[in-house]
Image (tube, rainbow, N blue to C red):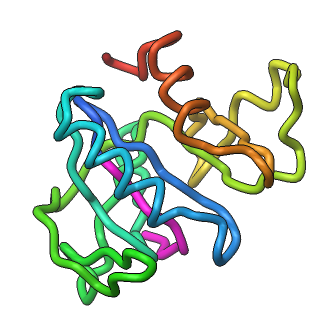
Amino acid sequence: MTTTHASAVLIGAHALLIRGPSGAGKSRLAFELIRLSERGGLPFARLVGDDRVVLEARNGRLLVRPAVSLAGLIEIRGLGIRRLPHEPVAVVGLVIDLSASDAERLPPPEAARTALSGIELPRLAVAPDANPLPVLVGCLGSRPMPGG
């Protein structure tokens, strides 16, 4: 098991693992996805973890869990730390890299995959100046996540 700085949100049957440098908007995107789901803009969405998550490769899948000390907590800039319902574990179906240096308008096919803990996963690279929410919603609408 590996602890990493990231946020994770379960959408439908699979989690989105949101990575990026400090201040890139990982928590903001996680919270926006949860709120969008509450308004009917996405299927079921629930927080898995914010700020730090634990990754574990098991049976060919990558599992994500919240760091124990942060389970159910999310930081909302300007409001502080808030408690939300959360999932204790989820299978990662998509990795989102915010402020990605390799984000391109027309990315090559190899940029759409990444490997974590020996598990290959779909990847979405979001440019530093791009709003990730519409890009992600477009990505989710254009292709199902594994098993979805």
Magenta segment: does it hold 7?
yes
Total count of labels: 0
Residue at 29 percent across and 85 percent down: it is 81
* Residue extending farthest top: 142
Residue at 26 percent across and 47 percent down: it is 35
Residue 12 position, x and y percent, is 23, 30
In the image, residue 128 sits, relative to residue 107, either above or below, namely: below
In the image, residue 121 sits, relative to residue 130, either above or below, namely: above
* Residue extending farthest front: 78
Magenta segment: does it hold 80?
no
Instruction: Please tell me in which quadrant of the rendered image residue 68 appears.
Output: bottom left
Of residues 35 and 84, the one nearer the viewer is 35
In the image, residue 85 sits, relative to residue 133, either above or below, namely: below
Q: Tell me the magenta residue range.
A: 1-9
Relative to 76, 6 lies left or right: right
The quarter of the rendered structure image containing the N terminus is bottom left
Of residues 71 and 78, the one nearer the viewer is 78
Residue 16 position, x and y percent, is 43, 44
Relative to 116, 42 lies left or right: left
| Majority SS type along the magenta span | strand
Residue at 34 percent across and 86 percent down: it is 80
Residue at 45 percent across and 78 percent down: it is 77
The quarter of the rendered structure image containing the C terminus is top left
Instruction: Please tell me in which quadrant of the rendered image residue 84 appears.
Output: bottom left
Residue 108 position, x and y percent, is 88, 21
Residue 10 position, x and y percent, is 28, 44
